[in-house]
Amino acid sequence: MTESQKVAIAVAQFNATVTDQLLSGCRQALLDGGIAAEHISVVHVPGAWELPLACRWLADTDSYDAIIALGAVVRGETPHFDFISAECARGLGEVALHSRIPVLFGVLTPNTPEQAYARSDPTRGNKGGEVGRAAVQMMALRRQLAP
């Protein structure tokens, strides 16, 4: 991994207690993976619904070697959860395939707030860190397979 590689992180502000911890874990994993702090850009969006468009805008800049989406959609009493989580996943997948830039899915879809806290807890396997490590691996694979 070279320190010249640049990563953008789009993080949802909704469920900020959870997403702030995801961001912290993700950023640390990127630093541990050799990404220079000044090459990590963070943008905030209102919620998970806005993540695909923000990631598309980031990809369209041609400035990043990977883009990470972080969010948390907690199941509730209505089908809202199903629509938001499915469309967020679909949209992020489209951005990745269209841009050919690794777009990492760090959007939690737990059934309860307690599950969301557990998955963002730095002492219990922060999922943001997992996504950051996956971004480092995907950038390395992209370089390996580049013509």
Image (cartoon, helix red, strand yellow):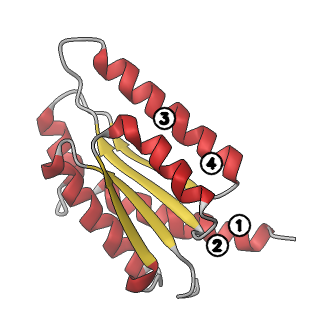
Residue 90 picture location, percent across and down: 54, 32
Mark 2 vs 1: CB contact within 8 A: yes
Determine the residue located farthest toward the right in the rendered image: 147
Residue assigned mark 3? 89
> Going by the image, does 41 lie left or right of 62?
left
Of callouts 4 and 1, the N-terminal one:
4
Closest to the camera, between mark 4 and mark 2, is: 4
Q: Secondary structure at mark 4?
A: helix
Closest to the camera, between mark 4 and mark 1, is: 4
Q: Secondary structure at mark 2?
A: helix
Disc 3 residue type (three-letter): Ala
Please name the residue shown 68% across and 45% down the image: 97
Q: Mark 2 and mark 3: span between their CA atoms? A: 23 Å
Mark 4 vs 3: CB contact within 8 A: no
**Would you identify the image quadrant in which residue 147 lies?**
bottom right
Residue 96, numbered circle? 4
Disc 1 residue type (three-letter): Arg
Please name the residue shown 28% across and 34% down the image: 73
Residue assigned mark 2? 140
Q: Mark 4 and mark 3: span between their CA atoms? A: 11 Å
> Total of numbered circles in the picture?
4
Residue 101 picture location, percent across and down: 64, 58
Residue 125 picture location, percent across and down: 26, 58
Disc 2 residue type (three-letter): Ala
Q: Mark 3 and mark 1: span between their CA atoms? A: 21 Å
